[in-house]
Image: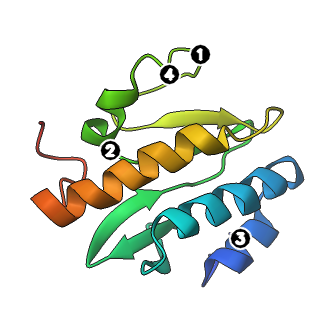
Amino acid sequence: MPKPRAKNITDYIAAAPAAAQKNLRELRAVLKAAAPGATEAIKWGAPVLEDEHILFSFPAYKAHINFMPTASSMRPFKEQLADYKTGEHTIQLPHDKAIPKTLIRKIAAHRVQQVKEEGALWMSRKK
């Protein structure tokens, strides 16, 4: 029988692997502080913060959280992200390491500002 999908981020965190829950709570707090007017939602089974447009997503997997701020938001922080496994739009945050709060806060603030100035830029347009 398939596991029921979470209806909100609190339920998502409670259903996440035990190893992920602390980092999910911390990441959620950092992102909410960076985007205080954003609304929490579950999209495609993953937690997101949105403010007219999706700002970031942060689903948990077996060994990591996949923080998804978009490629254009990550580019200015390329050097600081060198110690992390990254994809085009994603940063893997291992459960067994502390969340890099200062770096995440900077990336999130950059993303929020970018959306205000340029629009959505969600996983599509390259800049």
10 Å crowding of disc 3: few (<14), some (14-19), many (20+): few
Q: CA distance from mark 4 to mark 2?
A: 16 Å
Residue 13: x, y in percent?
A: 74, 67
CB under 8 Å between discs 3 and 2? no
In what element is the residue under mark 4?
loop
Question: Residue 55, located in which quarter of the rendered image?
Answer: bottom left
Q: Is residue 43 left or right of residue 103?
A: left
Label 4 or label 2, whichever comes before in sequence order: 2
> Label 4 belongs to which residue?
80
Image depth: mark 3 or mark 1 in front:
1
Mark 3 lies on residue: 3
Amino acid on which disc 3 is placed: Lys
Q: Residues within 10 Å of mark 2 (few under 14, many from 20)?
A: many
Question: How far, Cα to Cα, is label 3 from label 2?
Answer: 28 Å
Residue 70, numbered label: 2
Residue type at mark 1: give it.
Asp
Where disc 1 sits, the SS reads: loop
Q: Say whether disc 3 or disc 4 marks the residue closer to the N-terminus.
A: 3
Measuring from the top left, give residue 72's x and y in whole percent. Answer: 24, 38
Relative to 43, is 34 above or below? Answer: above
Q: Residue furthest right?
A: 18
For the point 42% across and 81% down, the residue is 37
Can residue 80 be spotted in the picture?
yes
Residue 122's label in the rendered image is: none
Between 69 and 108, the one nearer to me in the picture: 108
- First in sequence, mark 3 or 2: give its number: 3
Position of 87 compared to 84: left or right? left
Q: Secondary structure at mark 3?
A: loop
Looking at numbered disc 4 in the image, what kind of residue is underneath it?
Answer: Gln
